[in-house]
Amino acid sequence: MSAGRSPASRRPAAVVRLRPRAWILLLATSALGLVAFCWPLLATPRGTENLAHAGDAPWIFVLLVPLLIAVVVSELAEGLIDAKAVALLGVLAACGAALRFPGGGAAGFEPVFFLLVPAGRVLGRGLGFVLGAFTLFASALLTGGVGPWLPFQMFGAAWIGFFAGCLPPARGRAEIALLAGYAAVASLAYGLLLNLWFWPFVAGGDTAISFVPGAPLAENLRRFWAFHLATSLGFDIPRAVFTATFLVVAGRPLLGALRRATRRAAFGAPVEFAG
């Protein structure tokens, strides 16, 4: 390493460095997610089956997984990641899936976010996006939590990992404060987003918080916000506090471990076998 190399240049490179092809795939995947979450607000769904996403959720899942795999494959084809990066992705997804067992969503306690935020920060927004989605997928397989809610949970976790990789540069205590603040905001946003997928059918009847098919967008958004305030904050606020507290207490050693792993793995370096 040259003496004149700047500290910024010594930062470990992102494992999945996005190139135009990967950007297009991520944008297409995110657009699919936005449509999946928001279409009841913009169309006029009819029937309980449509409101409960019983018909569209399997198709969303069928499209989502190949798109995520395509992001990784496109980077493999570009030579920007290698087998070590894919192995790290699998290890982190397995660790994240295991972290769902201690919480189980009780009182909003979701320790998996404690891993997704630093991983997205250190390993890059591309890996953060893929890791978030695959972590929720793996945990659903382990816990038997496969259902119409799964693709929506995968999208929510993927966006948490992605935006963690988009945070501005910082070091030391400032970085921990940045990640803790982001984790708190992301936890609240995740709860808000996940409410949107089941609100149209769970708040039935003619109440002030019920979804009204075909009503103006502003009217349904007002009802959705009232539903969110009435039902979700009891889970979302504890999740935001738990996640931010974990990052303050143990964020620095976790960031250090992830950065050491990326340095020692030497992602992108050609593998040579001794003759």
Image (cartoon, grey):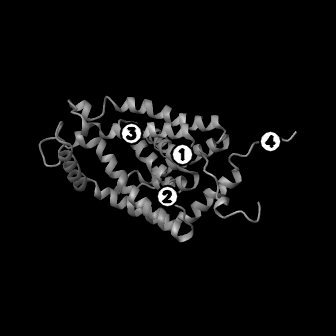
Look at mark 3 in the image and give the residue it sits on: 33
- For marks 1 and 4, the one nearer the N-term is 1
In the rendered image, the vertical position of residue 9 relative to residue 148, given as above or below: below
Q: Give the answer, above or below, for where 47 lies relative to 143.
A: above
Q: Which residue lies most toward the bottom here?
A: 173
User: What residue did someone put label 1 on?
Assistant: 126
Question: Circles 1 and 4: CB distance less than 8 Å?
Answer: no
Residue named by callout 4:
272
Amino acid type, residue under disc 2 in the picture: Leu
Q: Position of residue 239 (x, y in %)?
A: 38, 58
Graded by Cα atoms within 10 Å as few (under 14), some (14 to 19) or many (20 or more), the crowding at tag 3 reads some
Sooner in the amino-acid sequence: mark 4 or mark 3 = 3
The residue carrying mark 2 is 167
Q: CA distance from mark 2 to mark 1?
A: 13 Å
Total marks drawn? Answer: 4
Q: Residue at x 33, y 46 (%)?
A: 194
Cα separation between marks 2 and 3? 22 Å
Q: CA distance from mark 4 to mark 3?
A: 41 Å
Mark 4 neighbour density, 10 Å: few (under 14) some (14–19) many (20 or more): few
Give me the C-alpha separation between circle 1 and circle 4: 26 Å
| Callout 4 amino acid | Glu
Q: In the image, what residue type sits under mark 3?
A: Gly
Identify the secondary structure beneath mark 1.
helix
Q: Position of residue 137 (x, y in %)?
A: 47, 40
Tag 2 secondary structure: loop
- Is 258 situated left or right of 148 in this image? right
Q: Which of label 2 and label 4 is nearer to you?
A: 2
The mark lying in front, picked from 2 and 3, is 2
